[in-house]
Amino acid sequence: AAVTAAEADEIERAAEAALRPRRLAEFVGQRVVRDQLSLVLEAAVARHRPPDHVLLAGPPGLGKTTLAMIVASEVGAALRLTSGPAITHAGDLAAILSALQENDVLFIDEIHRLARPAEEMLYLAMEDFRVDVVVGKGAGATAIPLSLPPFTVVGATTRAGLLPAPLRDRFGFTGHMDFYETGDLERVLHRSARLLGIELDAEAAHEIASRSRGTPRIANRLLRRVQDWAQVRGTGVADTAAAAAALEVFEVDPRGLDRLDRAVLRSLCTRFGGGPVGLTSIAMAIGEEPETVETVAEPFLLREGFLTRTPRGRVATAAAWAHLGLTAPEGGPSRLF
Ligand code: ADP
């Protein structure tokens, strides 16, 4: 039977959950954030106090949710999960806050997407451990102050710059997550292969790692696709042949660019002459949300030197033209590079 999109999402989520490291010691790479977090958590445990609020910033798939879960497990606290978009009214947040137990870790994914009233309620709660619960409606509504037990907020955002200063200031510590080195991704892959019972050879791990856009989530997904290929078409072993074939089937190119990345670059070069052009125009040209282009594709393309940001918009670099096999126009903006 065909699998629906919702079922496919559910399968992805379950597969991801199975591969999450549970402890800080198992968390691969991100040495700086790991050291900082380890200090914050150890100090909290020694003081018998919940740790300071933690903000984790960085592109999707780098391990923010995983770290939030690790914060809770390292201090032996329960984890509550929510997200900015899930909280549509301040009342939703009031309900979540007033149900918190002492020491709970409240994970708020995409915290930059909280509505303004909820944001204000949150920073008061983070600062004073207090929330005003509004009872009744209209002229008869009254706010009843409720004090909250000490708890820890772990916020995750792909765009730390979008958080208003008062909210940002309530976090005792901000971990900036960066793309992973290929070597770290190889370690992630070997760990995942072990958990999934996949025989993965070193060369194949290197091949997959170097095409995973510096992102563990992508590395783990590609590993499962390589496993699929190995089982159905190959020898059962995730070897170089299986890796190369599967990456080709799923249209991941040798530099790790996927369909979205290439669509962004191609539209920038062929429709907008290499730029400069606004992000929204690019997003519209390829039928994507501007936020998706900005948070998913752009950070990687910037890092790999395929794109630059100028005050007048995005510009394709010479590397982008070359990668697409296109010739940059004479005298075009790309001549700047
Ligand atoms: P984010 O919340 O930043 O989008 P997640 O925490 O959901 O990312 O991580 C995505 C997937 O990548 C999970 O399956 C997780 O197990 C894996 N992963 C992320 N970071 C690491 C890491 N440092 N070591 C091992 N696996 C990781």
Image: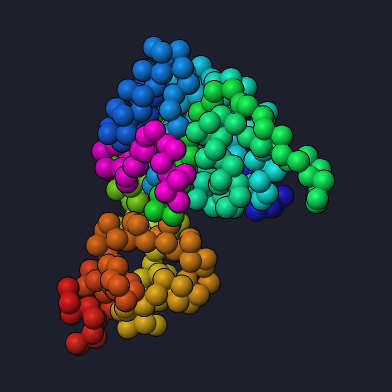
User: x, y percentage for residue 8?
Assistant: 62, 48
In the image, 59 versus 96, the foreground residue is 96
Tell me: residue 128, above or below residue 91: above
User: x, y percentage for residue 150?
Assistant: 54, 23
Which quadrant does the C terminus fall into?
A: bottom left
Q: Visible in this render: residue 168? A: yes
Residue 92 highlighted magenta (yes or no): no
In the image, 93 versus 210, the foreground residue is 93
Tell me: residue 325, above or below residue 163: below
- Image position of 79 (left or right of 157): right
Which of the 4 image quadrants contains residue 181?
Answer: top left
User: x, y percentage for residue 269?
Assistant: 33, 78
Which of the 4 image quadrants contains residue 251?
Answer: bottom left
| Range shown magenta | 163-186
Q: Residue at x 43, y 28 (%)?
A: 52
User: x, y percentage for residue 297?
Assistant: 40, 60
Q: Visible in this render: residue 205? A: no
Which residue is most to the front? Answer: 139
Which residue is most to the bottom? Answer: 330
In the image, 307 versus 89, the foreground residue is 89
Please, which colouring scheme is shown? rainbow
- Image position of 257 (left or right of 135): left
Q: Residue at x 63, y 27 (%)?
A: 147
Tell me: residue 72, above or below residue 165: above
Q: Residue at x 32, y 22 (%)?
A: 39
Tell me: residue 139, above or below residue 253: above
